[in-house]
Image (cartoon, grey):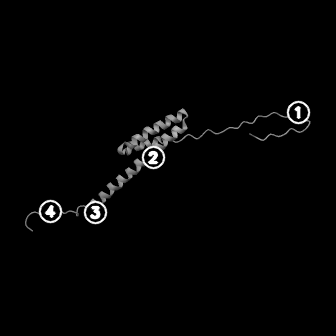
Amino acid sequence: LPPYEVLPAGVSMEELPRSTTVLLEEPPRPPRDHLVWSLFTTLYGNVCCLGLLAFVFSVKSRDRKVLGDYSGALSYSSTAKYLNITALVINITIVLIVVLIVVLIVTGVIGHMNPPPHYGPT
């Protein structure tokens, strides 16, 4: 509460100007639902259905945000974010392994590891 001031002697309440102070608080910023990121993860990198799970949690987060339940929306949003990150890391790892295998095949390293057996006279 604001501190109260003592009225000076000889001044009545009716002589003072009347004012009202209203404090406006900004509503909390709604959490991000990561819906677009989850959609792209679902379409382009749905490893072990992580993209689909992230999409489901993103939709749940958006529903909670519309209802005004920001703590529930934040929880679902966080889960969707971690599922998207996990799917992204797995996708990048798979792409790097495939590129490494293709490079090794093209350079001939894998082809010379086990030469085919020779049959017949040598």
| Residue in the picture at 41% in, 40% down | 53
The disc at residue 82 is 2
Q: Is residue 47 left or right of residue 119?
A: right
User: What type is the residue that disc 3 sits on?
Assistant: Thr
Query: Badge 4 is on which residue?
Result: 117
Q: Quadrant of the C terminus?
A: bottom left
Q: Mark 4 falls on what kind of element?
A: loop
The mark total stands at 4
Q: Mark 3 falls on what kind of element?
A: helix
User: What type is the residue that disc 1 sits on?
Assistant: Ser
| Residue in the picture at 16% in, 61% down | 116
Task: Where is residue 21? Give x, y as percent.
Answer: 75, 36
Name the foreground residue: 61 vs 105. 61
Q: CA distance from mark 4 to mark 1?
A: 113 Å
**Sequence order check, earlier mark of 2 and 3:** 2
Query: Badge 3 is on which residue?
Result: 107
- Pointers 1 and 2 in contact (CB under 8 A)? no
For discs 3 and 4, the disc positioned in front in the rendered view = 4
Residue 33 visible in the shown view: no
For discs 2 and 3, the disc positioned in front in the rendered view = 2
The disc at residue 12 is 1
Q: Is residue 103 left or right of residue 68?
A: left
For discs 1 and 3, the disc positioned in front in the rendered view = 1
